[in-house]
Amino acid sequence: MPGCSNDTLPAMRKPKSATKPASRSTRPTRQRLSQSERRVQLLGGALADAANVGLGRLTHAGVARECGVAVPTVFSYFENRAALVIATVEEVRRFYLELAGYWHRPEIPPLSALKGHLSAYTDSINTDPHYARVWLEWCTAVRNEDGIWDLFLEYHEQIIKLIGGSIRRGQKSGDIVKSISATNAARLLVSSGITVTQLHFMHRDKREINRFIDQSLMLALHHEPPVRSRQRS
């Protein structure tokens, strides 16, 4: 990251993900869960099913299979397919807004916040791939089935606001040039997340992905990297 080494980044904190359903071979004996615990479990199953078959083919039966519960149990929490799909993308929104909110705090230097957010997102693709797969589909759901494109636009504006806030702080402190539009720079960085996700699922080397992140930051912020970084690229 231009002007920011990894040594200066705060410790990365991963947002809490929905409970991942156990595999059928290792699933423990059923136990009674509270309503909130059951909902978390079902959301985990919904994320797994949507990641495997797509939001358009997400069903109560698929969630039931993932979680090892009866289909009526899923219906008791999500009354129809639209409610199930909406709850699934809302969970993805919660996960990524929590991640962004952690990094774009006023006490974190702007360049560290931007680099840390992108790096933490990249790491989350490894630890929570279901979220990344569903997010990648959600961000292109322009047909707006079940209203999920409207929900994505709301989420997108929230992310842009968080990232744009850090860019404006950097402009105020002199770490980022004032000639750029903070909103457009934030849009460029959010768009780069799509490519980062694709590179991950292409199984590209982590060093290649990190170089892409550094160059995305450089282009979005008009911030030149150190000479050594330019020589390696």
Image: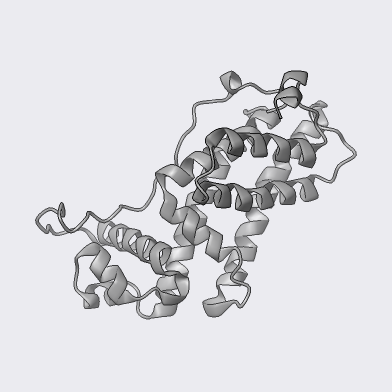
Colour pattern: one colour
148 up-or-down from 158: above or below: below
Q: Quadrant of residue 85?
A: bottom left
**Percent position of residue 196, x then y:** 59, 47
Please tell me in which quadrant of the rendered image residue 87 appears.
bottom left
Pick out the residue farthest to the right. Answer: 179
Rendered position, 18 above or below 230: below
Q: Residue at x 78, y 40 (%)?
A: 219
Q: Is residue 204 left or right of residue 187?
A: left
- Quadrant in the picture for the N terminus: top right
- Residue drawn at x 46%, y 71% as measured from the top left: 55
Q: Nearer the viewer, residue 84 or 1?
A: 1
Q: Residue at x 57, y 32 (%)?
A: 207
* Above or below 196: residue 74: below
Residue 105 visible somewhere in the drawing: no
Q: Is residue 21 visible?
A: yes
Residue lying furthest left: 29
How many badges with numbers are in the image? 0
From the viewer's perspective, is 33 left or right of 209? left
Q: 199 or 109, which is in the foreground?
A: 199
- Residue 80: give x, y in percent of width and height: 38, 81
Q: Nearer the viewer, residue 159 or 136?
A: 136
Residue 93 coordinates in the image, percent (x, y): 52, 57
Q: Residue at x 61, y 53 (%)?
A: 194
Kindly indicate the quadrant of the structure image that contains residue 172.
Answer: top right
Image quarter of the C terminus: top right
